[in-house]
Amino acid sequence: MYKFNILDVERKIKVLHVSQSLGGVETHLKLLISSIDSSKFEHSIIIPSEANSSIIQFLNEHQISFYPIKFKRGFHPIFDMTAFYNIVYYCIVLKPDIVHLHSSKAGLLGRIATKLMGIPSIFTPHGISYLSMVGMKRWFFFGIECFAKIFTKRIVAVSYSEFNRLVYEIGFQPSQITVIKNSLPETGFDIQSNKDKNGPFVIGTVARITQQKNPLLFLEIVKLYSERNHNVVFKYLGAGLHDHLISEFNDYIKTHNLSRFIEIIPWGSVSISDFYNSLDAFALTSIFEAGMPYVVLEAMSFDVPCVTSKCDGCVDGIEHDTNGYLCITAKEFVDCLENLSLSPDKRKQISMHARMTLKQNYNLNKNILLHENIYRQCI
């Protein structure tokens, strides 16, 4: 395999990305690929065969070569072995200088493949696999993460929460890990609020209907808030993308007669800017996040105050009652959201501090240089 020579200044560094996940990882990849210096780096990507049309469209528009393969969530020996051989095959064919592995399944298979082939690799967990598990399943995946250490040279974590778990739970050396936070472009988004100022208070979220996002807690917030005040509308954007808890979700809405207070919006059916511009507040009920969630950063960029779970990722960027709120129980969420609904001045104050946080800590224009440097260091 060709080894990159730092003196070969005319040739671009070839980076092969491998990811089996969508959602926030997709956002991360889009921002990374579109922002990095294209005169110095050439990207290709292995994506899941069930990838949605938005990532395909993006890759085509940016003329990025992509290679769909079949990934299965969880432990599936036959499918996993096939995916492993596919990763090896594309590494042989594409001859990348470095392979950047995103999320757990791609991270495990890719780390083993690149280690055996002698190709430098970087692993970005985007949330460590066992955090979404309970009982023996959690211990099983924790064991897999510990086993994968022997195949791991360099990690890029997206938050200090993730850094701490990698060091103090799994046992990586701090010197193996670089923290590069999830970030947004400094230009931000187009804020043109289409909110009816005389209408109900509008609270929204963007989340898959899966265990990690804790959608039933969101519905509990809807129930408790609407019992106190009927002048409210909740919007849930994200249906149709891995709806693992859709039956429980719909049953809760029906049982508690919440349909008049909540609008369920399929993923990809509305403009993201229109969605954020329609909100008075944003709520995220996740059990954990890898880093500051992109949806929270996006809401901040639209001057929408955020109320989030007091969990990994969110606690890295939210300072309670300064640039947002951190909550655990449904009552805490409702109290904070009511406080925002009753005080436009408080909403402005929270939004102002949130914008300062974005500019100082989550600025892609600055953080993309860290990615470029880590690629150069690893080859």
Image (cartoon, helix red, strand yellow):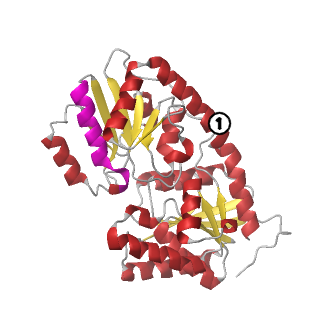
Residue 124, image x and y in percent?
Answer: 57, 63
Magenta span contains residue 214: yes
The image quadrant where one finds the C terminus is: bottom right
Amino acid at dot 1:
Lys
The magenta-colored residue range is: 212-229
Identified at 54% across, 31% down, the residue is 322
Q: Is 42 rendered above or below residue 240?
A: below
| Residue 358 is one of the magenta-drawn residues | no
x, y percentage for residue 18?
A: 54, 67
Above or below: residue 347 compared with residue 363: above
Coordinates of residue 308 in the picture (x, y in percent): 43, 41
- The residue at 39%/25% (across/down) is 339
Q: Is residue 177 above or below residue 326?
A: below
The answer to which image quadrant residue 95 occupies is bottom right
Give the dominant element type of the magenta stretch: helix, strand or loop: helix
212 up-or-down from 185: above or below: below
Q: Quadrant of the N terminus?
A: bottom right
Q: Is residue 308 visible?
A: yes
Residue bearing mark 1: 359
Labels in figure, total: 1
Q: Name the spot of residue 188 as percent of width and height, x first.
A: 59, 35
Relative placement, left or right, of 163 versus 339 is: right
Residue at the image point whose x is 41% and y is 56% from the top = 52
Q: Secondary structure at mark 1?
A: helix
Q: Nearer the viewer, residue 31 or 333?
A: 333
Residue 159 in sight in this render: no
Q: Give whichever of 93, 20 is nearer the camera.
A: 20
Callout 1: few (<14), some (14-19), or many (20+) C-alpha neighbours within 10 Å?
A: many
